[in-house]
Image: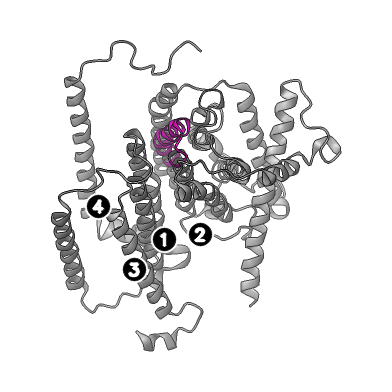
């Protein structure tokens, strides 16, 4: 009984984090982008500096009519947002926040679980792109698929390098065996992982699949109301998950001064800094063209990640 | 099987796992049958996701956690995405595809039955009544057990498969190269499909 309650409480906590953290990132993006562009951003909703803007947005989305195009494949069109969003909830369960089992549920092969489930989320975009019966959506879906196939490999290789260094696939295990010099040792892998993750989330500068100024948000063109909001939520949940994972794998998670008592704070802080960088990149970089995207993945990221794996192997053999 | 349930009381007794295994197996089989019989091409690919996911659940029930996630990563995450990419490139229509039917379906059925029969016979003959307790390696060491048995006892098949995949890779490159020779080269700048007038 007590155990069941424990598990339920943990899952509820993860659900709350899943509903709150993406909104926090979204609100930060509103304000940070605004100030970087010499604007104020939302100022009225909720009173203090527009803190309730995304709540108001949510209410707005919920009131909108839910339209399914006449020629669309109804069931797949309606299922797609759930397929895009749910994987990130599942991933959030296994990301360790603090020491001594401060994690939704420790999974033995957690690293592979995370990568596998994150790959499934892209199926949602593909389903949306095909089922909308719209050429812009189809183009978006095609670009999504091409991008995923190009960036999945460097991401996997970078993650494999960390697993080799730690000698385990369990995420809490990886953080436990972390030393400060790992960040330097795994620097190339970390950069590759973060970049490839951005591309998988279709965040700028890798947002060719949703390029709103040329293919009108790609796969999401035909979506309205709550279903569109779910896709947006998936994007921000993806940012939280990617930054959390990069923190856990490359920045040492809860390690820092007084890690025993405030370790969870370190994890959240590092995640927040990375999320800020994600927003910063959106403001400061122009969109890459599709062929530049592909070239970058195959000729830059993959060789770097292979070099990182070789380096990890050599150091591991020399030091052990 | 039934008497072992009395030794392991709990929410999911061994028989519970077996029943779940059977039910998931039936669902997987159903999804697989729909995959090859549906007239809608993209639906076939999506049913394939269900079938492959079902196999991953079966691996989980057999406590091979690592294999299950690799199954999801490779097949659901990559192979199906590749399939959908191909279907989108060939403009698979919404609704029935007129050419989704094949003349070869009876031959295909015969081949499928023969392959399934052979596999079931080989597996059943190899293990017969051997009772493998898959639950001894659960918990934090399941992946370690999988890894060590893969690279200690099954390393030769593993390496043979790697060579097979390498051969397939080289073959794919050779095939795509030959086609590039036959086709005339694009008139100008085929590397930049998007116009420069932005």
Circle nearer the N terminus (1, 3): 3
User: Which SS class for mark 2?
Assistant: loop
Q: Which residue is mark 1?
A: B65
Q: Which residue is mark 3?
A: B26
Circle nearer the N terminus (1, 4): 1
In the rendered structure, the residue with mark 4 lies on which chain?
B
Foreground residue among B79 and A167: B79
In the rendered structure, the residue with mark 1 lies on which chain?
B
Circles 1 and 3, Cβ within 8 Å, touching? The answer is no
Tell me: A71 left or right of B153. Answer: right
Residue B27 seen: yes
Measure how far apart labels 1 and 3 are at the Cα level.
Answer: 21 Å
Tell me: A41 left or right of A267. Answer: right
| Residue B153 coordinates in the image, percent (x, y) | 25, 61
Measure how far apart labels 2 and 3 are at the Cα level.
Answer: 27 Å
Tell me the magenta residue range: A131-156
Numbered circle sitting on residue A229: none
| Residue B48 coordinates in the image, percent (x, y) | 34, 53
Q: Nearer the viewer, mark 1 or mark 3?
A: 3
Q: Quadrant of the N terminus of chain B?
A: bottom left
**Residues behind callouts 1 and 2 on a single chain:** no
């Amino acid at each position: 009984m007590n155990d069941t309650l424990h598990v339920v409480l943990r899952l509820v906590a993860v659900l709350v984090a899943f509903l709150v953290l993406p909104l926090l990132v979204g609100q930060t993006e509103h304000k940070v982008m605004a100030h970087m562009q010499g604007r104020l951003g939302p100022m009225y909703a909720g009173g203090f500096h527009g803190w309730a803007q995304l709540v108001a947005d949510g209410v707005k989305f919920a009131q909108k009519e839910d339209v399914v195009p006449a020629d669309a494949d109804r069931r797949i069109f309606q299922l797609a947002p759930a397929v895009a969003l749910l994987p990130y909830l599942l991933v959030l369960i296994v990301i360790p926040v603090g020491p001594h089992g401060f994690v939704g549920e420790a999974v033995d092969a957690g690293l592979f679980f995370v990568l596998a489930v994150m790959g499934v989320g892209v199926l949602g975009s593909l389903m949306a792109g095909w089922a909308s019966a719209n050429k812009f959506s189809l183009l978006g879906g095609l670009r999504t698929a091409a991008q995923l196939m190009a960036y999945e490999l460097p991401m996997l290789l970078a993650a494999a390098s960390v697993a080799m260094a730690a000698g385990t696939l369990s995420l809490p295990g990886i953080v436990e065996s972390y030393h400060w010099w790992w960040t330097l040792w795994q620097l190339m892998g970390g950069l590759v992982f973060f970049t490839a993750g951005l591309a998988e989330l279709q965040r700028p500068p890798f947002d060719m699949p949703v390029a709103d100024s040329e293919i009108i948000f790609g796969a999401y063109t035909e979506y309205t109301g709550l279903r569109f909001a779910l896709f947006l939520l998936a994007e921000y949940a993806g940012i939280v998950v990617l930054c959390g994972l990069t923190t856990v794998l490359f920045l040492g998670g809860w390690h820092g001064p007084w890690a025993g008592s405030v370790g969870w704070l370190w994890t959240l802080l590092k995640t927040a800094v990375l999320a800020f960088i994600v927003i910063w990149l959106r403001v400061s970089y122009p969109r890459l063209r599709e062929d530049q995207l592909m070239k970058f993945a195959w000729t830059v990221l993959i060789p770097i990640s292979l070099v990182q794996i070789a380096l990890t192997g050599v150091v591991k053999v020399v030091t052990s | 099987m039934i008497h072992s349930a009395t030794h392991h009381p709990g929410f999911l007794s061994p028989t519970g796992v077996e029943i779940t295994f059977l039910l998931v197996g039936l669902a997987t089989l159903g999804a697989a049958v729909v995959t090859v019989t549906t007239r809608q091409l993209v639906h076939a690919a999506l049913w394939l996701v269900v079938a492959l996911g079902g196999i991953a659940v079966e691996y989980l029930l057999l406590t091979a956690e690592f294999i299950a996630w690799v199954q999801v990563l490779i097949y659901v995450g990559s192979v199906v995405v590749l399939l959908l990419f191909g279907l989108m490139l060939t403009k698979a229509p919404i609704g029935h595809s007129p050419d989704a039917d094949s003349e070869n379906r009876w031959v295909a059925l015969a081949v499928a039955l023969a392959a399934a029969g052979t596999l079931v016979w080989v597996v059943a003959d190899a293990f017969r009544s051997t009772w493998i307790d898959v639950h001894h390696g659960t918990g934090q060491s399941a992946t370690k057990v999988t890894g060590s048995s893969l690279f200690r006892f099954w390393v030769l098949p593993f390496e043979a498969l790697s060579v097979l995949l390498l051969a397939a890779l080289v073959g794919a490159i050779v095939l795509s190269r030959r086609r590039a020779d036959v086709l005339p080269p694009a008139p100008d700048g085929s590397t930049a499909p998007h116009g420069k007038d932005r």
